[in-house]
Amino acid sequence: LNIGDIKPSSRRYPGIFFEQERHAGDQILNIENLSKSGEGEMLFKDIHLNLNKGDKVVVLSRNSNALHAFFEILMGNREADSGEFKWGVTTTQSYLPVDNTPFFENDDNLVEWMRQWAKTEEEREAVYLRGFLGRMLFSGDEALKKSSVLSGGEKVRCMLSRMMLLRANVLLIDEPTNHLDLESIQAFNNGLKKFKGTVLFTTHDHEFAQTIANRVIEITPKGIIDRISTFDEYIDNPKIKELRKSMYL
């Protein structure tokens, strides 16, 4: 083996590190009797849930519309048919939606785009904002690209830069890996595993679900299944398999 013949890898890994501006108290999220229907079908009903500090919850459903509606309701973007929910007073939420189109409807460059979520004068400085963009591989002139011309993967990387800047203690993440390459997915996975706050997420990525979640919640037309469990333990449990069947009949 000739060391000189080995070509350096062109793979580039972003740096995804989620920090909290403040730590949340013990009250994170309480949901009582939440229900939602849409387009003539019941998406979910009778959801009663108390989220614990530090939970990392993968949220499942056989109906993707139910998942999207659930997250949109928790973020105040849609109304439930019945029930209520309450975030703890010490919580702050940051949301990565499955559809990020509304965030990219202007021609701001990426530094200007990021400045929308800066809270202090220091955070509004271009050098400071470029640091967050640089972590997601928008370095040099890349940080001056127009936000309206980004690819799907670039938009998700911008949204992750935004989440890191916000430093929330609760992250809500809806199907995050759809447009990301393998390197970004691995970095995202590691960032969420190391995050000390609370996470609610949906995903089709088995590695994400198995390595991050310590709790599984499945929302169904007949109620909720809630288990402190890894994803694989939940899916493989024969009693839960039977219960899941009955909840969708």
Image (cartoon, rainbow, N blue to C red):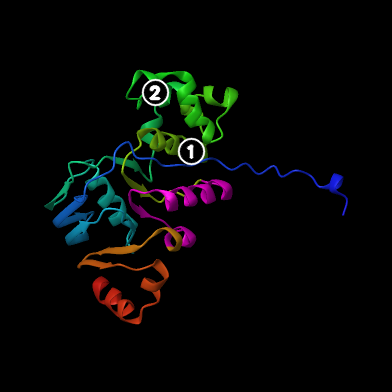
Residue named by callout 1? 157
* 44 drawn magenta: no
User: Residue 34 at what x, y percent from top left?
Assistant: 15, 56
Viewer-closest of 55 and 110: 55
User: Residue 226 at what x, y percent from top left?
Assistant: 26, 66
Which three-letter amino acid code belongs to the residue tagged 1?
Arg
Residue 137, above or below 228: above
- Apparent side of residue 15 relative to residue 84 in the rendered image (left or right): right
Which three-letter amino acid code belongs to the residue tagged 2?
Glu
Which element is circle 1 on?
helix
User: Residue at the right extreme?
Assistant: 2
Q: Residues within 10 Å of mark 2 (few under 14, many from 20)?
A: some
Residue 150, above or below 94: above
The span picked out in magenta is: 180-209
Residue 123 disc label: 2
User: Residue 31 at what x, y percent from top left?
Assistant: 16, 54
